[in-house]
Amino acid sequence: MKYILIFGISLIFQITLFSQRRFDLKIISESRQREAIVSVPTTPPPAEGYPIVFMCHGTSGEATNYYNPVGWKELGQAENFITIFPSALVWCYNDKRDDNKEKHLSKFVCGDLVDQVCEEDSNKLISDILFFKKLIQLVSDTLKVNPKKIFMSGFSNGSSMAHKISMETTDVFSASGGSSASLHSLDSTTPYPRRIPMLYMLGTKDDRYLSDLFPVELPFGGDSTLLYLQVSIRRALICQGLTEEFSKIETPVSHIYTWNTCRSGETCAPYVFMLNKDQLHEFPNGQNHPVNAPKLLWNFFNNPPVVRMTTPVHELKQPDWDISFFPNPTSDYMYFKANGPISGPGQLKIINLSGEEMVQYKVSTEGIRIMDIKSWPAGIYYAICSTKAGSKVKVLAKL
C-alpha cells in the first residue's frame, strides 16, 4: 500500500460517505507555503492510472471557493479521474480595469498578473508551474496516475494560467481549457516540446469584455464578436501553428469555432473558441448557465479535433489592399473607396452590433461609392469587405 509522502506537508484527510475522498494539502514551494485540495474518486484507478484535471480559480479566489460549485469533482467521481484545486498567492497589482487602483488579491502568476504587478512585488514573483509539478509528483507518488492524461482548466485569471500552461508546460499537460480570459501577450510563445489542444469560452454578457462598442452584451448573431476579438484569437492561432481557416457550429446557446488546419511546415494543435449566449463572467456549470463546462472540457480533453490540411470553410486572412470610409462618423451620407488592387470580385457588407445586415455592395478598385445612412439608427456598425484574398473590417459610426 502507498501512502502520501509528507515532506514539509500538513495533510488533512477527509472522506465523505458515498462521495470523493478529499485531501487538503499544504506544501512548501520556493520557500512559500502553498495550498491545494485534491479530490480522489472512490473507485479503483483505470488500468493506465487516474487522469488528473486541475481547476484554477479566478482573481481573489482560493481552492475552497471552487471545490463545490463548479462540478469538476462530481464529474471526477463519475468518470474516474482526480481533480486538483490549487490556491494562488496574494500579490499587489495595479488594476487596469479600475483606474490602476492598487489591490492585494490572489492571482496565479501569468501575463495577467505580470502586466499589472506593483513594483514592490515585481521581483518576488514565484512559479505556479513549479507548484503544479510538485502537486502532480506528490499525487503520483501516492496513487497510480496516467501521465499522458493530465489536463488544465481555469476561470478568468485561472483561464489565463491555463493558456500559459499550453505555452510553457506541454511536457506535462496534454490539453487545456478555460472560461473568461484568453492567452495574454506576455505568455505568447512557441510551445515546447509540443503543442497541445486548447479551448477558450466567453459569454456575451461578460462585463470584462464589454466596451463603448458593446456596452450591454457582445453580439451573438453573425461573426462580429469573432472580429471584435481577432487580436487575441490570432495571437493564439500563431502560437498553435494554425492558419486562420475555421469551421463553425451554431446551437441556440453557443457558437463554436474550430481552427485545426496547420500552417505549412508546422506541427499544429487545435484551438477552439466558444461564444456562449447570456453567460456572465463565470465558469458555466450547467446550473448558472446551460453550458456545462466540466463535461464539455472533459470531452474536449479526451477527444480534441483532428488537425488537418483541407480547404477552409471560412477565413479571416488580411489582404494587401484596404478600404476607407469618410466622413466617419457622419449622420447622412458616407463615402467609401478601395485603396490598392482588389483581385477578383469584392463584397462589402455593413452589419449592426446584433449581426443584422444593413446593406451590401459590390466593390472594385474603380472610383468612390456613396452610402445613404440617414435612416439608420445612431450607433456603431461593422463594415466587412471580403474577396478571395481575404477580408478587411472597419468600424463605422452613425451620429
Image: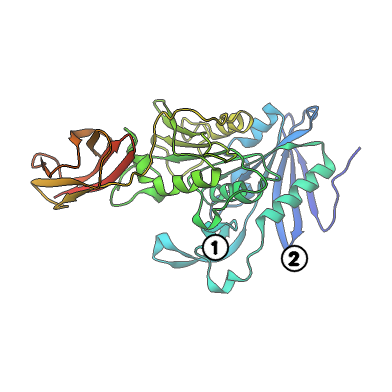
- Which residue does the image show at 46% across and 30% down from the upper left? 290
Tag 1–tag 2 contact (CB < 8 Å): no
Whether residue 35 can be seen here: no
Is 180 on the left-hand or right-hand side of 227?
right
Q: Residues within 10 Å of mark 2 (few under 14, many from 20)?
A: few
From this view, report whether residue 18 is shown above or below residue 165.
above
- Which residue does the image show at 72% across and 43% down from the upper left? 38
- Residue 254 percent across, percent down from the top left: 42, 31
Query: Which label was assigned to residue 114?
Result: 1
Q: Quadrant of residue 198?
A: top right
Query: Which label was assigned to residue 31?
Result: 2
Look at label 1 and name its amino acid: Val
Determine the secondary structure under disc 1: helix
What is the C-alpha distance between the residues marked 1 and 2?
A: 20 Å
- Which residue does the image show at 39% across and 26% down from the upper left? 252
- Residue 30 percent across, percent down from the top left: 73, 63
From this view, report whether residue 48 is shown above or below residue 225.
above
Q: Quadrant of residue 15?
A: top right
